[in-house]
Image: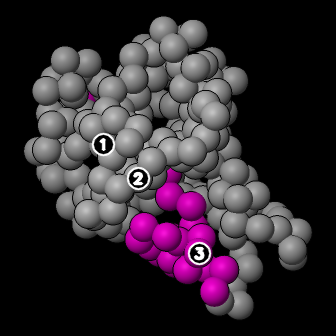
Amino acid sequence: MGHRDSSSISFLLLGMDGDFTGQVIDTLLNHGCKPVAVVLYGESFNDTIGGVKIELQRPGLTWLDRLASEQVTTYFSTTKTLIPLLEKHKPDILLTACWPRLLPNKVLQCAQLASLNIHPSLLPKFPGANPLRDQLSTDDKQFGVTLHQMNEHYDEGEILSQSKISSASNADLKHIEQQCASSGASLFIEALKDK
């Protein structure tokens, strides 16, 4: 990342409507770290991903309400329609937390300073879309989260920082996912302070 006063660095967050993105948002907002906008993948809350209809059955996403109360604009978009949103907001940093598609270079280059990802594993172990499920199916119980730069390949950009997650031996996927999201947001906040 380039050098600039962290209080003047703007970022736009890309994610999904799930718990991982929500926990990242809550942690960021709890630390006064407010994105210029949030873009959630899809056309709306009832969308199709890979030919499968996704319909949320949740009674409400409190983090989405919180974004509205903090006056953070939330959009729905796909990778194909991201560039106009990025050109509108001109973020210094593009931050992803569970964006389900590979971002092409033309999208990554819209960020003025860096395009970063919060990934719920200690890369290079367990790259890809379901790292926690993949890891839970092994004997490797050292969970963690990685903040890394993005490039044209999934989870192969330069690792900026990592944090190990201590969890009980009987911890479930949801609990580990929440810990990774919160720790990943903290890694991002620390990276901003270092710039």
| Residue range highlighted in magenta | 112-137
Up-down: is 179 above or below 154?
A: above
Identify the residue shown where x is 87% and y is 76%.
169
Whether the magenta-drawn stretch holds residue 120 is answered as yes
Q: Report x, y in % for residue 60.
A: 61, 31
Up-down: is 41 above or below 8?
A: below
- The residue indicated by pointer 2 is 54
Which is more N-terminal, label 2 or label 1?
1
Where's the N terminus, which quadrant? top left
Q: Quadrant of residue 83?
A: top left
Q: Please identify, in this view, whether the residue under mark 2 or under mark 3 is nearer the observer.
A: 2
**How far is disc 1 from disc 2 in space, using C-alphas?**
10 Å
62 horizontally vs 1: left or right:
right
Residues 61 and 23: in front is 61
* Local crowd size for mark 3, using a 10 Å CA cut-off: few (<14), some (14–19), many (≥20): few
Residues 54 and 102: in front is 54
Q: Please identify, in this view, whether the residue under mark 1 or under mark 2 is nearer the observer.
A: 2
- The residue indicated by pointer 1 is 42
Identify the residue shown where x is 20% and y is 61%.
152
Q: Are marks 1 and 2 in contact (CB under 8 Å)?
A: yes
Identify the residue shown where x is 76% and y is 58%.
175
Identify the residue shown where x is 69% and y is 85%.
140
Q: Quadrant of residue 188?
A: top right
The amino acid beneath tag 1 is: Gly
Q: Please identify, in this view, whether the residue under mark 3 or under mark 1 is nearer the observer.
A: 1
The local secondary structure at tag 3 comes to helix
- The residue indicated by pointer 3 is 133
Residues 173 and 97: in front is 173
